[in-house]
Amino acid sequence: MSVGTLEEIIDDNYSIMSASVVSEHYISILSFVNKDLLELGSLVLLGHKAHAFIGVLMDDLDLLVTVMKVEKAPQETCDDIGGLDKQVQEIKEFVEFPLLNIMKKWV
């Protein structure tokens, strides 16, 4: 799937979408899409294989933040991961150590 911008509504079944700065596509609007939410310039979800408009993304969503958002913190700890001691240690050194020792760097 990809994200595009609604450029033009042709009729109830078709629209023009831009998926990047230089390309616009004439694609079908799937029947389950809420057409009341369609506004020019809206961010929309596009299906790759069918080249179809499959949904409208709400304006209050920042896609980059949404993708990185953790809905629920995992309950597992590094001790629960078996057989990856070297990789776990590398992650701790790369991520945890700088965060836990930031004051030592500046003092």
Image (cartoon, rainbow, N blue to C red):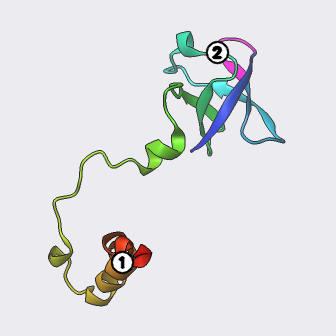
Q: Which residue is mark 1?
A: 104
User: Which span of residues is magenta-colored?
Assistant: 10-15
On whether residue 12 falls in the magenta region, the answer is yes
Q: Tell which of 71 and 56 is nearer to you.
A: 71
Q: Residue at x 46, y 47 (%)?
A: 67
Q: Residue at x 23, y 87 (%)?
A: 83
Residue 82: which quarter of the image? bottom left
Q: Position of residue 30 (x, y in %)?
A: 57, 24
In this rendering, the answer to whether 21 lies above or below 55 is below
Q: Earlier in the sequence, mark 1 or mark 2?
A: 2
Q: Residue at x 35, y 69 (%)?
A: 99
Q: What amino acid does circle 1 point to?
A: Lys
Q: What amino acid does circle 2 point to?
A: Glu
Picture quarter with the C terminus = bottom left
Q: Tell which of 22 and 48 is nearer to you.
A: 22
Q: Which residue is mark 2?
A: 39
Q: Secondary structure at mark 2?
A: loop
Q: Residue furthest right?
A: 22
Q: Residue at x 51, y 16 (%)?
A: 34
Q: Position of residue 4 (x, y in %)?
A: 66, 35
Q: Is residue 66 left or right of residue 5?
A: left
| Residue 6, numbered circle | none
Q: Is residue 103 left or right of residue 81?
A: right
Spatial CA distance of label 1 from label 2 is 52 Å
Q: Is residue 71 left or right of residue 33?
A: left
Q: Secondary structure at mark 1?
A: helix
